Image (cartoon, rainbow, N blue to C red):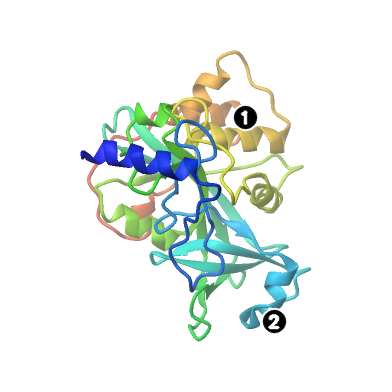
Amino acid sequence: MGMKLAFLVSVFVLNASAAVNCLVDPKDPFEPNSVMPSGKFKGACLDTVHDRSYRILTPAEINQNPSLNGFNPALFHFIANFKHDDRFWIAVVPRQDSVDRLVYEVERVPPRWLAAHVELRVVFKPGKGMILFSQTDPNAKPIIVQSVTLSNGAFSMRGGPEYNLWNATQDYFGLKRTLLSTEQTLADLSRTENDVDQYLIAFPKSKSVQDYWEFALNYYLDPNVSMTYHTLFRNCSNMIFHGFDKFLGYSGGVIDPLETMIPLAGIRALQNRQLIHSGSRTKSLKEEYGIPSEWMPPLVTRTN
């Protein structure tokens, strides 16, 4: 039996079941039982070994975890399934005055003249970083990270089809909402020749990066994966702009959906919202961390 046929048969059997158990790690109390939410593969297990959508801990879960006893829930966020070092952690971060800056990131992927993945990076103030606690080892020492990536992406099914632009229009992938450390992002980049262009986001005076971080944590919260990913309509780029527009109360023009749909056109969409200007581009992520990178042509930005 071919791999694709075997996968289809397994999905049919899963869909015929009253309930599907996709859990693989009995030691992890926060592992989600994530399945495809809709489409022809509805109910198929998503690959939670490698990816998970983040979720906010409940008061009961906070109280039951001895590692968290020293933190006041009124002053801190508690986030499960934060990815760092290829593992998942509980992340604790102050609710107030913690964010230093917000960065729009563009990772060029082959073919680099056409394709890209975009995400947001949140950099915390000194002494206000995320504290990570192991989800499976109560004796593990906590780790502090100073910046994190918020990403919307294609969530693969376990044993499912490989990602490509066509497959991602066929309801073959869930829409994941992930939080991961910058160190994890760099580790993922090290397996490729890609680099990440970075642009500092500047909100109007009535808004702050702290306000946006608080908004985004709730806006993108979808631990049970309620939507499928789509190359055109629910992708890494337009999901970010949906959040920006909700936060800003912004209504775009006629061609705005096209600019926000295409990752490499997102720079113009940011300029239209006055979120970046000619001086917003900073060092690439690899340059910032002193990592050699293959040369890539810069994105063209307007100066007016």
Q: Amino acid at mark 2?
A: Asn
Q: Quadrant of the N terminus?
A: top left
Q: Amino acid at mark 1?
A: Arg
| One can see residue 264 in this view | no
* Mark 2 secondary-structure assignment: loop
Residue at image mark 1: 273
Rendered position, 67 above or below 150: below
Q: Earlier in the sequence, mark 2 or mark 1?
A: 2
Mark whose residue sits in front, 2 or 1: 2
Rendered position, 43 above or below 234: below
Q: Out of 279 and 106, give the one closest to the viewer.
A: 106
User: Which residue is located at x 60 percent, y 13 percent?
Assistant: 254
Residue at image mark 2: 69
Q: Where is residue 55, by image quadrant?
A: bottom right
Where residue 188 appears, as percent x and y from the top left, is 33, 55
Q: Out of 69 and 167, give the one closest to the viewer.
A: 167
Determine whether, in the image, residue 218 is placed left or right of residue 292. Answer: right
